[in-house]
Amino acid sequence: MRKLTIPIPRTTFSNLQRMFPNLFLDVREIPGSEKNPRGGREKNAEILFVDNSKLKCKETYDPDSPIKEIYEYFYDWYNEDGILLKKFHAHYHPNGTPAEITKYDPWHVHIKMNFADQHGDNRRGVEPGRTILDVLEEFEGYISIRKFDKRKSEADKTIK
């Protein structure tokens, strides 16, 4: 039986820095195209953003597909201290997984329930077809707001 894919091509991470030049400090592909034990090939990368937050990326794709179609992706966003901010995932959970989890398959996000939550136990569905470009556009908004907040708080310190 053919494994279910999500109909988007794997990411060429080196192109992202050219597409979002004001967002990235660095994009680093982790060498090797490892075989994934659940099938397909795995591609890993880490993106460092201008606010020093990081996106850890893992994509499993079909190497025989003309567009290297993705089986699953996991894009996990961490602040500069390594604290989880949010997870953006697209994958099918295995048989036997509770319905309250599988109802969001394949596209979903994990949102923290509280500061100590490092797994993002609160899941929510997102629009189908979401790619890394959609995730990065969301980050652009977050990061520009955070830069504004930093400038405002630094200005407040000089006033006092």
Image (cartoon, rainbow, N blue to C red):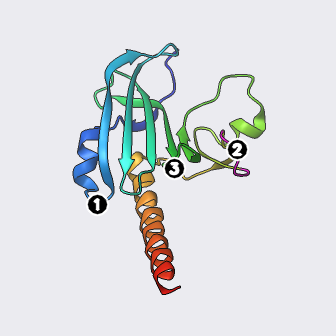
Neighbours of disc 1 within 10 Å: few (<14), some (14-19), many (20+):
few
Question: Disc number at residue 117?
Answer: 2
* Distance (Cα) linking label 1 and label 2: 30 Å
Q: Position of residue 2 (x, y in %)?
A: 49, 18
8 on left or right of 125: left
Where are the magenta residues, as a range? 113-118
Q: Residue at x 44, y 66 (%)?
A: 141
Say whether disc 1 or disc 3 marks the residue closer to the N-terminus: 1
In the image, farthest residue toward the bottom: 159
**Front-lying residue, 52 or 71:** 52
Is residue 92 depicted above or below 126 in this figure?
above
Between the C-alphas of marks 3 and 2, the distance is 14 Å
**Residue 150, horizontal then vertical, whole percent:** 47, 70
In the image, is residue 105 above or below residue 40?
below
Circles 1 and 3: CB distance less than 8 Å? Answer: no
Badge 1 marks a residue whose secondary structure is loop
Earlier-in-chain disc, 1 versus 2? 1
Q: Is residue 22 left or right of residue 71?
A: left
Quickly name the residue at label 1: 22
* Secondary structure of residue under mark 2: loop
